Each structure stands twice: as structure tokens, then as C-alpha cells.
Amino acid sequence: MSLGLYLHIPYCLARCRYCDFYSRGGQKEVPDAYVDALAREMARWGNCDCTALRPDTLYFGGGTPSLLRPAQAARLVDQAAPAPEAEVTLEANPETVDPARLEGFRRAGINRLSLGVQTADDDSLARLGRPHTAAQSRQALAWARQVGFSNISGDIMLALPHYTREEFDRTLDLLAQGGCTHISAYLLKIEPGTAFARHTPEGLPDADAAAEFYLYAVEQLAAAGYRQYEISNFAKPGYEGRHNLLYWDCQDYLGLGPAAHSCMNRRRFYWPADTRAFVEGRSAPVQDGGCDGEDYIMLRLRLAAGLDEETLARRFGVRLTERQRAFWRRCQAAGYAAPGDGALRLTPAGMIIQNSILVELLG
Ligand code: SF4
């Protein structure tokens, strides 16, 4: 089994209107006390019998991890002691970086940058509450390449208010010209508890229009050389995100920090969303059930590589029933699943309605 280590950085300059991730806005930096708390928990897990902490991937997620000072990031990377060929990713927001900071992250051992670009349209960025412009994204990508990052992901959103194909084209152009080797493209969802849930923005595409934008994006990304390998993830050959691939293959991952989730030895747990309790050492992971064959089916069907039945049987002792096979043949006939008897794979049209397919498949 591989091990992924996730470190959550719950601080942001401002809260974006659509965001339901656990983080606090109005923060310009990450307190040393928080870095101390992450280091403390890493030491604790590194010493326990359940894992020899030598991660194959290390991921700084948030929140806005680029609010870390490079020295803080270096301290955490050193302590995590990732394996020699490990992928070490840091999520960054364009308005928080400059060449010196990016250079510092490189020296700290970060070898993959994930930049929150979202869109190339400044009006859209303002509507989303993002505190940066498209020009700042373009500049951040140029600096990242200048200081030597060659593995760069761009995070974007699709089906934004008043969205058009032209907005997507401009965004793809910004990322491709900026040297991105990987693109994550998520459909905007109005999540409970967000500013968008309290005041729904005007001009939101309906479900059919959103699905069309998604299919258009898949097509254009493929034409630009970004191969789809997961519902929302696209990469140039060899640049697939290794950390998230661990999640989708039910490998072990340990998340540290408030609201961070883990699955180790098929047991899930998470930290309560309480930064102060985490810093003060008053917080403990909450058990959240197990990971079984159904989880594996759900996660593998997110991937373009799909679900291999023999692996399902070997790892989880589960085989598809005749009812499930008959349903899958109907999905193939309708164009939602790829033809053939090999791995079970959804087509892009099937990926859009993956939830409904899973309800029927696993029901
Ligand atoms: S989208 Fe990112 S930057 Fe915006 S509030 Fe959420 S975590 Fe912070």
C-alpha cells in the first residue's frame, strides 16, 4: 500500500462566496502555533505502530497553504520526510505569491504547485469573491515556471454565473500558455452555508446547460492535450496527480489538521473542524466507519481507467451480481459506459450522472 499525507492549512485572505472548505478568512499568514500543532501531530503519528510515516505523496491543502512562509513549509516537509521520489504539492492562490516566495517553496521541497485560477474573466472572479485578477494568475504561472516548477496544476470552475464557452476558452488558453501540466475543472455547486447559498447569484446555468459546459470542456481539454483521468481532472501524459489517485484507489491517506479526513487500514476518521482545539491539543480524531467494496466501486468509477473486477474481488472479496451486470449493459447501450468486457468505465456523459448510476448499481 502507498501512503499519502495531507496537511490542512485553514487560513485564507478572504472567504470566497462559493466555498464551503473549512478555513478562516481575513488571515495574512499562518501562525507558528498552528505549524507547531501540525508538527506535533506528525510526530505522534510517525511514532505509532499503525504506520511508518514515510509518505509517497505529501499535499498541503486548504484554505490557502501559500500563506505559509517558505521556512514553515520547509519545516513541515522536513518532518514529513517524504519518500525520495514523492510528489509534494502545495495549493497556492495567485495573489499570495511572488518570485521569492515561490523560489522558497521550491527550496523547501515542494515539487508540484496547484494554482487557484478559477477563470480568466475578471468580472467572474469578482462575483466569486476571489481577491485576484486573471493577470495575477498569468503572472503567478510565469513566476512559477521561472523559478523551476515544471509540474503545475491549474484549478478552474465551470458553469459560473453568466458562463459562456468563450470564457472557458480564454481560461484554458491562460492555463495552457502558462505551462500547466494538469487541470482540475469543477462545476460550480451551491453549497449550504456559503454566501452563494444565502444570496443565489444571477445568471446561473441550469443543469442541462452545466452538463453541456462540462462536455465542451472535456472535448477542448482533450484537444489541448489534457487527457481526462478522473471526472474533474485532466493531465498531460505522466502528470496525473498522484496524491488524489491514492484517494480514488482506496490506498491509505492520513489527513492532519481541523476538518482533515483520513482512511488508514480501511478505517475512516476525521478531525473536528475546530482550529483552536487542534492547536491546543484538545482535539482527537473522530471515527467515521470503514471502507469496503462499495466505496471502492464508487471511487474507481470516478476514474477514466475504471473498475477492474478482478482487483475488486482480490482486494475486497466482492463480485458484481447478475442484476448489476445487466444494469451495466444498459448503461453501455445508452452511451453512459464504455463498451467491452474489460474494466467498467464511464464515458464523460456517464460521469455527469455518476451519482444516479451508482444509486442504481449499488441499490
Ligand atoms: S476557495 Fe480557497 S481561497 Fe477561497 S475561501 Fe475557499 S479555501 Fe479559501
Image (cartoon, rainbow, N blue to C red):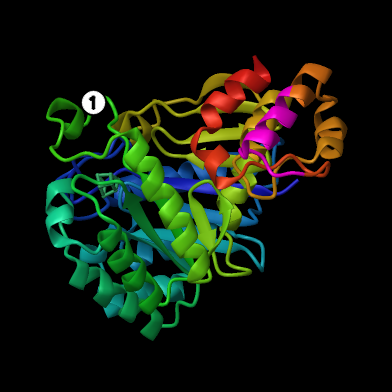
Q: How many marks?
A: 1
Q: Which stretch did the figure color magenta?
A: 327-339
> Residue at label 1?
193
Residue drawn 28% across and 68% down? 170
Asked which secondary structure carries label 1, the reply is: loop
Q: Quadrant of residue 92?
A: bottom left
Observer-nearest of 356 and 301: 356
Q: Is 322 positioned to the left or the right of 181 in the image?
A: right
Residue drawn 48% across and 56% down? 218
Q: Say which quadrant the N terminus sits in.
A: top right
Residue 93 visible somewhere in the drawing: no
Name the residue at the front extreme.
333
Name the residue at the bottom extreme.
146
Kind of residue indicated by mark 1: Gly
Residue drawn 39% across and 34% down? 258
Whether residue 205 is situated above or below residue 92 in the rendered picture = above
Observer-nearest of 266 and 179: 179
Residue drawn 50% across and 69% down? 223
Magenta-drawn stretch contains 331: yes
| Position of residue 78 measured from the top left corner of the image (x, y, whole percent) | 52, 62
Q: Say which quadrant the C terminus sits in.
A: top right
Whether residue 324 is situated above or below residue 145 in the rendered picture = above
| Position of residue 314 measured from the top left corner of the image (x, y, whole percent) | 87, 34
| Position of residue 271 measured from the top left corner of the image (x, y, whole percent) | 45, 29
Observer-nearest of 65 and 202: 202
Dominant secondary-structure state across the stretch colored magenta:
helix
Magenta-drawn stretch contains 143: no
Whether residue 65 is situated above or below residue 332 in the rendered picture = below
Report if the beta carbon of the residue with label 1 is closer than 8 angstroms to ligand 1: no
Q: Is 324 positioned to the left or the right of 124 in the image?
A: right
